[in-house]
């Protein structure tokens, strides 16, 4: 990154004599005031002028954010630094730094000035995309896949419900059922298509069946929530998907929607209301925690494991659910739950949020020493746990790779759904 | 600079291809834009951005769904889009080349781009056939085109990483292998805006009578039979490496 503004010339002279005294090289000499014009508000204003990115200008450089930013832990990042880079010549809309933030919201939690990267980043990225600036290739692929196939993996829409076969229990499709259900289960793209995601989806289907829940899924009519694509700057794509999804959701009668993923929860609960959809939506952990009394006697087989739980940013910080996942894990006989150093409100991001899911190679090339998921996998291993439990469909694949690449294969990465299912079935 | 880009809509291979009779079951596949055509659109727009001009994108509408691809082209910087309303999903590249040539004839093109081939038939004939019908020179395997006056500097790729630079006088037809830059992203909001505001010019297919009996006939189509499997070697990385070395030695490769 070449600074746009030239630094002021050095104000120190090589040899300086003041009142007959040679003060060359003296530690505290200063002959002129520092020139303030070497910093410019121009590029800060450029960002703050974008609707929704206004708070970028609020920063007063206290640096509380940098201490908690997960990207800074493996690199050189955080709102304070971005502000400072902008002050010294970086145009954020053109810099690789635009794509590193995962919108994990840990900085927002501590910022005294409410500098909100969760709003700044999508707005600045959208601007960059609309202006035809650079978009990381992998992200572009995920956008195009979502627009074309209805999911970021680029899998055919026709096969969205093919995973049902591996569940071994009935998974009704709401269209075929032709009646009202109490629970509409939105499965999500990764649980529908990704091999490890399918494992969690099948486990959920078995748990819902065992609990006698009156549920159905959308099947081939289900499409991606596109919330991460929105946070990565593709608001137009998000809006297109939102219109289609709301139309599908409202076609059927149901009391409550249960989602497998925290990103879908965030979309349907916090963002869709702006588009006219206001119906009850819960994450599966919150939903199942209501059934703990009924669930406990079914968890017959001990899972004798030391388990640590990773708080997904979009379940925890963004939606305030920290306890339900832990209650579910503690309900499993044999489980010893241990906490990682960074947990709950200060949970460390897996790197998958805000489009990070599709930018691992890009991020790796820009001033980071390792993936965020690898940092977290190491933190999990350092607790002595042999299972890293997750509650977000992005995480199973991310952490499965990360435990391998950091030499921690002895740590199994499992969705809470899979652990509950194992305890129910004894596998 | 007047650039015409011929595009091709082809069955998507994101899913297994369903076969019906001796052809693809066109009713149960999605159609997508041929990947190489994304590069020829990018190349055309890059030239327009550097020397000015207009980009016209034209394709044969095989199943009545070409508009999406055309709106996308507009969002990426094309100025005009045309569809040939054939409504014949089985039309082969020879037929399409004829229809395209008839439609392109009166457009006064300085350059006509086509993808170097399409992944449905790997025929690679549309470009050369358009050139023949329009009586223009053809250059294939193109990896960059720069316009200068009434000729163009064209990079052509050969096997084994070799390449050559040609001066080609206009008008000509180029089969684009890749654009010098990856195809740009068109934000969905722009594509939707185009879908609402832009007009797609319609042209009826013509020139059929000139095409003699189709030289290519599909006799049979069937999914490939799986013959061999990849062998996954289990074990630690050391064990796996040792086994690979052993295998290479046993096959006389190391
Ligand atoms: C980002 C930044 C950069 C700056 N850079 C410069 C600079 O380069 N040069 C310069 O000259 N100035 C600079 N300043 C300004 C300078 O820091 C302030 O003017 C100065 O700190 C003000 O001192 P203060 O004691 O009045 O208030 P503060 O520094 O705000 O201290 C107030 C103190 O009082 C305590 N307090 C508040 N209420 C109570 C209470 N009810 N009871 C007991 N304790 C209380 C607070 O905890 C705090 O410790 C900068 C300020 C900021 C924010
Ligand atoms: S915590 Fe807020 S005010 Fe402090 S440096 Fe970070 S962004 Fe700026
Ligand atoms: S949202 Fe998270 S990743 Fe982004 S700057 Fe803040 S702390 Fe860092």
Image (spheres, coloured by chain):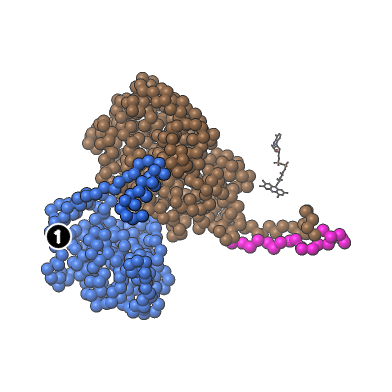
Chain colours: A brown, B blue
Q: Between A327 and A360, which is closer to the camera in this rendering?
A: A360
Q: Position of residue A307 (x, y in %)?
A: 45, 30
- The answer to whether residue B165 is left or right of residue A366 is left
Q: Label 1: few (<14), some or many (≥20) within 10 Å?
A: few
Residue depicted at x 36% and y 53%: A144
Q: Between A416 and A402, which is closer to the camera in this rendering?
A: A402
Query: Residue B109, can we see it?
Result: no
- The answer to whether residue A305 is left or right of residue B176 is right
- The answer to whether residue B158 is left or right of residue B225 is right
Q: Position of residue B199 (x, y in %)?
A: 30, 63
Residue depicted at x 57% and y 39%: A110
Q: Please, what secondary structure does the residue beneath circle 1 have?
A: loop
Which quadrant contains ligand 2? top right
Q: Position of residue A252 (x, y in %)?
A: 28, 37
Label 1 near ligand 3 (CB < 8 Å) = no
Q: Determine whether B252 is above or below B108 in the image.
A: above
- The answer to whether residue A413 is left or right of residue A160 is right
Examine the structure image and report whether residue B163 is included in the region drawn in magenta: no
Q: Position of residue A225 (x, y in %)?
A: 37, 43
Q: Determine whether B219 is above or below A411 in the image.
A: below
Query: Residue A340, can we see it?
Result: yes
What residue would you read off at disc 1?
B218
Q: Quadrant of the N terminus of chain A?
A: bottom right
| Magenta stretch: dominant secondary structure | loop
- Of all residues shown, which one is farthest toward the right? A20
Q: Residue A228 occupies which quadrant of the picture?
A: top left
Q: Between A240 and A420, which is closer to the camera in this rendering?
A: A420
Examine the structure image and report whether residue A6 is included in the region drawn in magenta: yes
Residue depicted at x 74% and y 57%: A33
Which residues, given as a range, are shown in magenta?
A4-23
Q: Quadrant of the C terminus of chain A?
A: top left
Q: Residue A42 occupies which quadrant of the picture?
A: bottom right
């Amino acid at each position: 990154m070449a600074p746009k503004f030239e630094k002021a010339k050095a104000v120190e002279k090589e040899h300086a004599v003041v009142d007959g005294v040679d003060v060359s090289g003296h530690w505290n000499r200063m002959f002129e005031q520092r020139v303030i014009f070497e910093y410019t508000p121009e590029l800060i204003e450029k960002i703050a002028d974008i609707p929704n990115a206004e708070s970028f200008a609020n920063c007063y450089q206290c640096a509380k954010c940098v201490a908690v930013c997960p990207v800074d832990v493996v690199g050189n990042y955080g709102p304070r630094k971005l502000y400072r880079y902008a002050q010294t010549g970086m145009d954020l809309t053109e810099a690789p730094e635009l794509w590193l933030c995962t919108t994990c919201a840990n900085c927002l939690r501590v910022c005294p000035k409410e500098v909100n990267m969760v709003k700044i980043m999508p707005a600045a990225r959208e601007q960059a995309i609309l202006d035809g600036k650079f978009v990381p290739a992998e992200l572009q692929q995920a956008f195009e896949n979502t627009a074309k196939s209805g999911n970021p993996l680029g899998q055919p829409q026709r096969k969205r419900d093919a995973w049902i076969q591996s569940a071994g229990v009935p998974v009704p499709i709401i269209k075929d059922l032709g009646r009202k259900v109490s629970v509409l289960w939105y499965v999500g793209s990764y649980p529908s298509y990704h091999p490890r995601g399918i494992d969690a989806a099948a486990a959920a289907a078995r748990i819902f069946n065992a609990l006698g829940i009156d549920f159905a899924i959308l099947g081939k009519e289900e499409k991606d929530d596109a919330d991460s694509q929105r946070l990565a700057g593709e608001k137009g794509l998000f809006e297109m998907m939102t219109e289609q999804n709301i139309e599908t959701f409202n076609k059927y009668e149901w009391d409550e929607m249960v989602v497998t993923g925290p990103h879908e929860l965030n979309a349907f609960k916090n963002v869709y209301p702006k588009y006219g959809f206001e119906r009850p939506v819960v994450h599966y952990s919150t939903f199942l925690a209501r059934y703990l009394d009924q669930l406990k006697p079914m968890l017959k087989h001990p899972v004798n494991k030391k388990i640590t739980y990773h708080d997904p940013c979009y379940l925890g910080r963004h939606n305030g659910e920290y306890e339900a996942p832990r209650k579910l894990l503690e309900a499993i006989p044999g489980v010893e739950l241990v906490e990682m150093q960074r947990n709950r409100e200060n949970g460390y991001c897996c790197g998958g949020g805000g489009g990070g899911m599709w930018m691992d190679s890009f991020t790796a090339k820009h001033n980071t020493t390792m993936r965020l998921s690898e940092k977290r996998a190491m933190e999990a291993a350092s607790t002595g746990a042999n299972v890293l439990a997750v509650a977000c469909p992005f995480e199973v694949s991310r952490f499965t790779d990360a435990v391998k690449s950091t030499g921690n294969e002895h740590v199994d990465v499992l969705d809470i759904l899979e652990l509950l299912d194992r305890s129910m079935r004894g596998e | 600079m007047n650039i015409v880009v011929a595009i091709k809509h082809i069955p998507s291979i994101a899913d297994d291809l369903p076969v019906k009779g001796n052809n693809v079951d066109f009713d149960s596949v999605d159609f997508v834009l041929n990947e190489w055509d994304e590069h020829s659109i990018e190349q055309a727009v890059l030239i327009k951005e550097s020397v000015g001009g207009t980009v016209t994108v034209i394709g044969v509408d095989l199943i009545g769904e070409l508009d999406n691809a055309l709106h996308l082209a507009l969002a990426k910087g094309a100025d005009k889009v045309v569809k040939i309303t054939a409504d014949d999903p089985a039309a082969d590249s020879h037929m399409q080349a004829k229809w395209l040539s008839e439609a392109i004839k009166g457009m006064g093109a300085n350059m006509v781009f086509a993808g170097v081939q399409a992944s449905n038939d790997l025929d690679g004939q549309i470009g050369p056939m358009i050139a023949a019908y329009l009586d223009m020179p053809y250059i294939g395997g193109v990896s960059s085109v720069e316009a200068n006056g009434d000729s163009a500097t064209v990079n052509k790729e050969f096997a084994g990483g070799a390449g050559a630079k040609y001066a080609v006088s206009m008008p000509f037809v180029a089969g684009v292998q890749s654009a010098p830059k990856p195809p740009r992203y068109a934000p969905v909001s722009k594509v939707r805006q185009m879908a609402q505001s832009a007009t797609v010019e319609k042209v009826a297919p013509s020139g059929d009578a000139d095409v003699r009996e189709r030289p290519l006939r599909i006799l049979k189509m069937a999914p490939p039979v799986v013959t061999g499997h990849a062998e996954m070697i289990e074990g630690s990385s050391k064990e796996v490496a040792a086994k690979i070395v052993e295998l290479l030695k046993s096959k006389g490769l190391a």
